[in-house]
């Protein structure tokens, strides 16, 4: 954390605002469906490496201090959006668990998509190294 530059600090502030904003958004706890969890997880895990491979973008491991809007290195933006989905899904999950004493299926879907994107980033880097 002490090695963060201005970009890393701005990204942390944006994610903190997203996390806190999830507590104020009105949501209805939808029932948990296995499809709501597995499909986003598979989509994030498989689609991202395939898109990166087909479009032949520059592959490099994303760093927290990198600018997420550099289009030549899409893994940086993907990492930021993965953390975005994780922060939003976690805050909504906590809110519905506290207020409604239920687990929200859509929040779990967001968390699964964020985890899927992070898995997809690792797969894309591994596939890129095998060339």
Image (cartoon, rainbow, N blue to C red):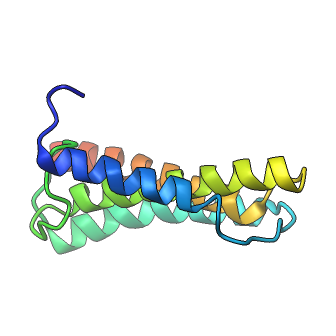
Task: Tell which residue pokes out farthest to the top in this image.
Answer: 2
Position of 42 with respect to 46 (left or right) is right
Look at 20% across and 60% down and name the residue there.
68
Task: Give percent across and percent down for residue 78.
Answer: 32, 60
> Where residue 54 sits in the image (x, y, percent)?
23, 72
Q: Residue 25, image x and y in percent?
A: 65, 69
The residue sitting at 60% across, 61% down in the picture is: 22
Query: In this figure, what is the number of numbered marks?
Result: 0
Task: Answer above or below: position of 13 versus 32.
Answer: above
Nearer to me, 71 or 94: 94
Side (left or right) of 93 relative to 54: right
The residue that appears at 52% across and 51% down in the rendered structure is 86
Identity of the residue furthest to the front in this view: 24
Q: Report the quarter where the N terminus lies.
A: top left
> In screen coordinates, is 36 left or right of 130?
right
Q: Quadrant of residue 69?
A: bottom left
């Amino acid at each position: 954390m002490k090695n963060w530059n201005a970009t890393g600090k701005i990204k942390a502030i944006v994610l903190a605002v997203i996390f806190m904003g999830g507590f104020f958004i009105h949501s209805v706890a939808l029932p948990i469906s296995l499809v709501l969890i597995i499909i986003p997880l598979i989509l994030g895990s498989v689609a991202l490496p395939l898109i990166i491979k087909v479009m032949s973008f520059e592959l490099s491991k994303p760093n927290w201090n990198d600018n997420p809007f550099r289009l030549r290195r899409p893994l940086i933006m993907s990492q930021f959006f993965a953390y975005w989905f994780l922060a939003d899904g976690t805050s909504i999950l906590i809110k519905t668990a506290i207020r409604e004493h239920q687990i929200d299926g859509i929040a779990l879907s967001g968390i699964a998509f964020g985890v899927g994107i992070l898995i997809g980033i690792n797969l894309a880097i591994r596939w890129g190294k095998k060339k």
